[in-house]
Image (spheres, rainbow, N blue to C red):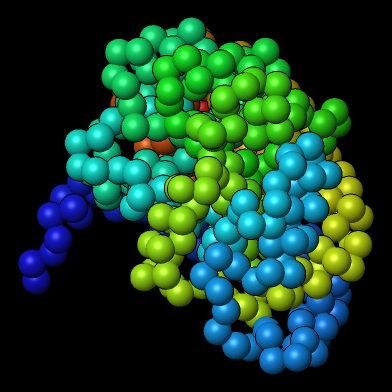
């Protein structure tokens, strides 16, 4: 079969092969990016879906491409509580935040356009933007998120179509951009007239102190920045990824183009899922759900950090994440031990424990010593056992 030439830009994920091995019986997996299904508020969602079905005609009918109005109103209130003033008409509902990324690719990227992403960044973003022909440029990060001085140099040099950042508890980096750097990012957006995309599926998932306000919330402090900022949100990591509810806040002109593209793509996000999410947000259960996921994932992150330190010692470097789902670590090779995460991953699977090597998360200059470990789906006991097995694979 003759496929479209745009597919030449994309390979199937390099980590897919590894995922095939995850079915091995007895394996403890830190490889996935899923939240824990045991954490879903099934009771609350059952009640919300029941109420959704009682809405006269609404939940089972075709709907507006921009989204179901009661959900847009609830999401506007949800964002307001996080310091973002947005009218319901200033956001569209998307089929997961993944669709927002795809719509941004469709509406903004022409073949050959340059887009700056963090090194490392979310793998599906790399694949999606490449599908539209983007030339990706990687901006280095540290534990405090993207290095703003380097980012500014890259913006000045490449004049990108836009910059894509995951400023809070990044996937895979776990890193969070400091308040000072956030303001710098907004200032450089205005100075260089550059669009910034803030992908924020993890911002609500913090364990201790709340992270700094989102870039979108901070636009009020930097005149001119709101017109250059796109914010993607999602209910996937805190409520349920199966609902496929995300949203995008963007300048009106971009939102209109994205809505047009969405119309050709899926007409609208499932009305039933939207009505259910709206009822759920209206029910007032969200604060308790957030408190629960923060508590449980916080305990798991703590256990993983302690176990890594205890079991792997100076063979590995990492920063304890303050939220999200991931540890990002680097093999040091100390004492002649393994420094290549691909080799380590294969040996780890022989010891019945899995993680994801970090190299595929880099759009440029992969660091083969890096790896990503998710602490979301294993309980504390399994985490300790799994990290113990990792130590045996070194
Ligand atoms: C950074 C980032 N963006 C977007 C997504 C997509 O999430 P969803 O489409 O479920 O909202 C994910 C999921 O893993 C992610 O990690």
Q: Quadrant of the N terminus?
A: bottom left
Quadrant of residue 369 within the rendered picture: top left
Q: How many marks?
A: 0
Residue 49 vs residue 62: left or right? Answer: right
Q: Position of residue 174 (x, y in %)?
A: 62, 31
Is residue 204 visible in this depiction of the protein?
no
* Residue 178 versus residue 17 in the image, above or below: above
- Which residue is found at the position 63% from the left and 88% from the top? 60
- Front position in the image: 40 or 227: 227
- Which residue is found at the position 76% from the left and 82% from the top? 52
Residue 108 vs residue 51: left or right? Answer: left
Q: Residue furthest left?
A: 2
* Residue 180 versus residue 302 in the image, above or below: above
- Which residue is found at the position 70% from the left and 51% from the top? 87
Q: Position of residue 383 (x, y in %)?
A: 71, 43
Is residue 209 visible in this depiction of the protein?
yes
Q: Position of residue 109 (x, y in %)?
A: 30, 43
Residue 156 vs residue 296: left or right? Answer: left
Q: Position of residue 256 (x, y in %)?
A: 46, 56
- Which residue is found at the position 65% from the left and 28% from the top? 219
Residue 211 vs residue 171: left or right? Answer: right
- Front position in the image: 92 or 60: 92
């Amino acid at each position: 079969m003759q496929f479209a030439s745009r597919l030449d830009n994309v390979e199937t994920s390099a980590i897919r092969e590894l995922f095939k091995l995850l079915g091995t019986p007895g394996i403890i997996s830190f490889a996935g990016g899923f939240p824990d299904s045991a954490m879903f508020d099934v009771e609350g969602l059952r009640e919300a879906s029941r109420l959704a079905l009682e809405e006269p005609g609404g939940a089972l009918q075709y709907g507006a491409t921009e989204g179901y109005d009661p959900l847009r109103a609830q999401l506007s209130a949800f964002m307001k509580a996080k310091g973002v003033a947005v009218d319901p008409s200033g956001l569209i509902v998307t089929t997961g935040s993944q669709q927002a990324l795809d719509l941004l690719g469709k509406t903004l990227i022409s073949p050959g356009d340059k887009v700056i992403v963090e090194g490392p960044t979310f793998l599906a973003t790399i694949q999606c933007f490449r599908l539209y022909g983007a030339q990706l440029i990687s901006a280095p990060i540290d534990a405090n998120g993207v290095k703003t001085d380097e980012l500014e140099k890259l913006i000045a040099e490449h004049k990108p179509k836009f910059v894509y950042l995951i400023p809070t508890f990044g996937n895979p980096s776990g890193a969070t951009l400091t308040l000072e750097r956030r303001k710098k990012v907004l200032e450089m957006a205005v100075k260089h007239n550059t669009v910034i995309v803030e992908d924020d599926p993890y911002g609500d998932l913090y364990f201790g102190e709340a992270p700094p306000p989102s870039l979108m919330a901070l636009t009020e402090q930097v005149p001119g920045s709101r017109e250059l900022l796109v914010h993607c949100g999602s209910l996937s990591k805190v409520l349920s990824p199966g609902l496929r509810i995300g949203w995008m806040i963007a300048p009106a002109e971009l939102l209109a183009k994205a809505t047009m593209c969405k119309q050709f793509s899926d007409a609208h996000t499932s009305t039933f899922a939207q009505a259910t999410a709206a009822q759920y947000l209206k029910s007032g259960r969200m604060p308790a759900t957030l408190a629960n996921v923060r508590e449980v994932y916080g305990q798991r992150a703590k256990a993983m950090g302690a176990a890594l330190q205890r079991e792997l010692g100076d063979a590995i470097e990492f920063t304890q994440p303050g939220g999200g789902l991931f540890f990002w670590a680097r093999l040091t090779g100390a004492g002649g031990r393994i420094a290549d995460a691909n080799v380590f991953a294969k040996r780890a699977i022989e010891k019945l424990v899995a993680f994801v090597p970090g190299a595929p998360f880099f759009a440029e200059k992969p660091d083969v010593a890096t790896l990503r470990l998710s602490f979301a789906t294993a309980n504390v006991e399994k985490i300790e056992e799994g990290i113990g097995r990792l130590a045996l694979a070194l």
